[in-house]
């Protein structure tokens, strides 16, 4: 029971607190939503969130490679984790090409897929799992929580954008400026809810 409570705490921590990447991802999605359809933004967010799991496991495995060698610094686990994540990414690309058969993915889709797999969130999860001393199941829960928290943030943004359609907004704030203000308000609400301490 104690392990389940610890894993639940880690899941919530990953979903809300431990992600310094949300603001950057959220702003990137805000700009992206201005240029693309909402369905495309949600699909790309799902890809980003799904790649958090292999990123977390690659970070953990990169750390495990060097755990027995005491004379090798721990920060070398990060490049090992990145190489493992690149291998997982290449395997998923090969699977996409095999599953497509005659109808292969378009160059546009592969460009977007590559960008989403190496965006702030999966790479950040990889770094945090590689530098923290998680067990394998804790790294898996951390990756899951990070992906779910990011999907929640993107969904909040889409709902916010839908409500803006029916609101009277001054001309100079229409479009991207009001979306950036909304993203900032959601970020401040999360920091107000969870607390934040400045580094000394």
Image (cartoon, grey):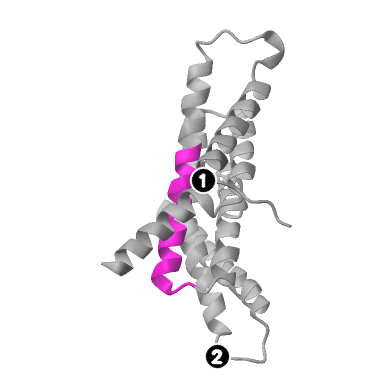
Tell me, yes or no, whether the highlighted magenta stretch contains residue 152.
Answer: yes
Q: Residue at x 61, y 68 (%)?
A: 82
> Can I make out residue 181 in this image?
yes
Decide: is 84 above or below 144.
below
Q: Is residue 126 magenta?
A: no
Which of the marked residues, 1 or 2, is nearer the chain's N terminus?
Answer: 2
Q: Position of residue 12 (x, y in %)?
A: 42, 52
Q: Residues within 10 Å of mark 2 (few under 14, many from 20)?
A: few
- In the foreground, 168 or 93: 168
Residue at point 67%, 87% (across, down): 72
Task: State left or right for residue 181 relative to residue 161.
Answer: right
x then y, percent, for residue 155: 46, 34
Residue 152: name its quadrant: top left
Say the numbered circle drawn on residue 98.
Answer: none
Residue 112 position (above or below residue 18): above
Q: CA distance from mark 1 to mark 2?
A: 37 Å
Quadrant hosting residue 25: top right
Q: Residue 68: which numbered mark, if any?
A: 2
């Amino acid at each position: 029971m104690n392990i389940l409570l610890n894993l639940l705490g880690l899941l919530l921590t990953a979903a809300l607190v431990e992600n310094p990447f949300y603001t950057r991802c959220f702003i990137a999605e805000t700009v992206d939503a201005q240029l693309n359809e909402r369905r495309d933004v949600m699909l790309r967010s799902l890809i980003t969130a799904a790649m958090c799991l292999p990123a977390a496991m690659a970070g953990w495995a990169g750390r495990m490679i060097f755990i027995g060698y005491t004379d090798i610094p721990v920060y070398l686990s990060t490049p090992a984790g990145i190489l493992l994540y690149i291998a997982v990414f290449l395997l998923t690309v090969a699977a996409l090409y095999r599953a497509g058969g005659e109808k292969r993915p378009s160059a546009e889709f592969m460009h977007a897929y590559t960008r989403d797999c190496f965006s702030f969130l999966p790479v950040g999860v990889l770094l945090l799992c590689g530098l923290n001393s998680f067990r394998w199941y804790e790294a898996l829960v951390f990756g899951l929580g990070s992906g779910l928290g990011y999907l929640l943030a993107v969904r909040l943004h889409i709902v916010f954008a839908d409500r803006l359609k029916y609101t009277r907004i001054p001309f100079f704030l229409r479009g991207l400026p009001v979306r950036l203000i909304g993203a900032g308000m959601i970020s401040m609400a999360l920091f107000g809810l969870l607390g934040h301490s400045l580094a000394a």
